[in-house]
Amino acid sequence: MREKVRDKDRLLHIDSTIQLLLDAKKKYTRDEILSDPITFFGFSRGLEIIGEAVYMITKEFREEHPEVPWRDWEKFRHVMVHGYYKVNPEIVWEVLEKDIPVLLPRIQSLLQQT
């Protein structure tokens, strides 16, 4: 069973990982991220951490805050972890480019509320 008192900690993990990814993304081009195995691994791992933190947030908290696509992130985490051998680099780039910048203000807003 997930612990409700940990929801804020999970939000902090998501926030800090997003910050890390966004800061690192400034140092690399798209091609560098997608073509260098270790760099790609690092960015992929960051996305896995976000997905795992989302997965650990209580059902009650998620239901109270439907503005975040929790289930989508949980499904993405499942693919990244269990389908690691078939992860599409273009999808990873799209998530870094489009989804992460949208997620950040939502998570920061929730942190201000909790």
Image (tube, grey):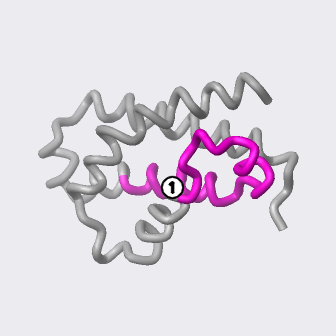
- Taking 41 as reference, is 30 left or right? left
**What kind of secondary structure does the magenta stretch mostly adopt?**
helix
Residue at horizontal 38 percent and vertical 28 percent from the top: 23
Residue at horizontal 57 percent and vertical 31 percent from the top: 106
Q: Where is residue 49 in the image (x, y as percent from the top left)?
A: 53, 53
Of the 4 image quadrants, the one containing the N terminus is: bottom right
Quadrant in which residue 55 is drawn = bottom right
Q: Where is residue 76 in the image (x, y as percent from the top left)?
A: 45, 62
Q: Name the residue under label 1.
A: 73
Q: Is 63 or 83 nearer to us in this picture?
A: 63
Q: Please, is residue 106 above or below residue 59 in the view?
A: above
Residue at horizontal 73 percent and vertical 50 percent from the top: 63
Q: Position of residue 75 (x, y in %)?
A: 49, 65
Q: Is 76 or 47 nearer to us in this picture?
A: 76
Q: Position of residue 12 (x, y in %)?
A: 66, 36
Amino acid type for the residue under numbered disc 1: Trp
Q: Is 39 or 114 nearer to us in this picture?
A: 114
Q: Please, is residue 9 above or below residue 110 in the view?
A: below
Of the 4 image quadrants, the one containing the C terminus is: top right
Q: What stretch is highlighted in magenta?
A: 44-71
